[in-house]
Amino acid sequence: MSIRDWNGDKAIETLHVETMDAIERACIIVWRRADRLLSIEGTGREGTVKDRSRPGEPPRKQTGELKDSVTYEIDEKLSQGRVGTNVDHGKYLELGTKRGILPRPWLRRALLESADEINNALGRKK
């Protein structure tokens, strides 16, 4: 085989497609885990106290707005994926606030708890 026979552009395109598929699989795994973490019932719409989350635990579902807002997006130009929410209180629950709300991490926890599953999906070993 001569160097002229090698199809570099096709190889690069194939690698890009496989990489983007892997990134999307990883995002879906984290997104599903975040959805499960945010599915534990809390006080609910009526305001009756069932069970509130404690600092360090994922937030409990109140109205479902945060849970329903979690999504993922893929940026093919940057070859990256993001999982998150556009709901402001999602960030405050994740990180806490300067005014004393202690963190109730749900997104970082979803990523950490998904690490093994992501590695398995990508064919990696620990």
Image: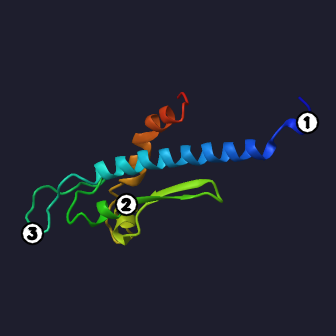
Q: Which mark is residue 70?
A: 2
Dot 2 crowding, Cα within 10 Å, few <14, some 14–19, many 20+: some
Callout 1 secondary element:
helix
Q: Any mark on residue 3, and which?
A: 1
At 90% from the left edge and 39% from the top edge, which residue is drawn? 4
Q: Residue at x 35, y 46 (%)?
A: 33
Q: In which image quadrant can residue 60 be found?
A: bottom left
Q: Is residue 58 left or right of residue 71?
A: left
- Nearest the viewer among 44 and 58 is 44
Residue marked by disc 3: 46
Type of amino acid under label 3: Glu
Give how far across and how far down residue 5 sits, in percent: 86, 36
Indicate which disc, 3 or 2, sits on the residue closer to the N terminus. Answer: 3
Q: Is residue 62 left or right of residue 82?
A: left
Q: Amino acid at mark 1?
A: Ile
Secondary structure at numbered mark 2: loop
Look at the image and tell me whether residue 57 can be seen: no
Residue 31 lies, in percent from the top left, at: 40, 51
How far is disc 3 from disc 1 in space, using C-alphas? 70 Å
Tell me if label 3 and label 2 are in contact, CB under 8 Å: no
Please tell me whether residue 88 is drawn above or below residue 93 in the rendered image.
Answer: below
Disc 3 vs disc 2: which is toward the camera? Answer: 2
Q: Quick one: SS at disc 3?
A: loop
